[in-house]
Image: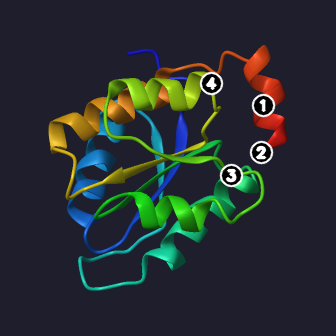
Amino acid sequence: MNFLFKKISISSDHAGFKLKETIKKSLAKNKIFVIDLGPKTDSSVDYPDFAKKVARNVASKKSKIGILICGSGTGMAMSANKIKKIRAAVCYNKASTSLSRKHNNANILALGSRLTKKSTALKLVNIFLSTKFEGGRHLRRVKKV
């Protein structure tokens, strides 16, 4: 797989912790540098705190891309999207993931660990990290966001 991004920020809440750890291992095998912003265990935490850590890293260009995992992906995406310059997309299949990059230039992938099988999540991460933004008519729209 030809990845466009070699450094990513990642975080989860307690519901997404195990999937986060699985994704980190997969990324490491592909020689992608991972900035893990927590949590360190699956003890209960508040998802907005961790979503904002990744969003701030991406907005400040410590990494160009981020991954967030919670139970549904929705809470993480909503929290991350409060940060300027962030376009977090909840993705649940190949088409939604591909289009989030091609048409929306999403810079954070939000996954739902309770709604997405591990094998599917790993495929979605690969798609997200290897899909280029198409620009053109989409750039005009993204600028309006």
Which type of secondary structure does the marked residue at label 3 adopt? loop
Q: Are marks 1 and 2 in contact (CB under 8 Å)?
A: yes
Q: Nearer the viewer, mark 3 or mark 2?
A: 2
| Residue 145: image tag | 2
State the residue position of label 4: 103
Mark 1 neighbour density, 10 Å: few (under 14) some (14–19) many (20 or more): few
Label located before the other in sequence (4 or 1): 4
Which type of secondary structure does the marked residue at label 1 adopt? helix
Which type of secondary structure does the marked residue at label 4 adopt? loop
Q: Amino acid at mark 4?
A: His
State the residue position of label 3: 86
Q: Amino acid at mark 1?
A: Arg
Spatial CA span between label 4 and label 2: 12 Å
| Residue 141: image tag | 1
Label located before the other in sequence (4 or 3): 3
Q: Amino acid at mark 2?
A: Val
Mark 4 neighbour density, 10 Å: few (under 14) some (14–19) many (20 or more): some
Spatial CA span between label 4 and label 1: 9 Å
Q: Amino acid at mark 3?
A: Ile
Residue 67 in percent (x, y) is at 46, 50
Residue that appears at 32% across and 60% down = 72
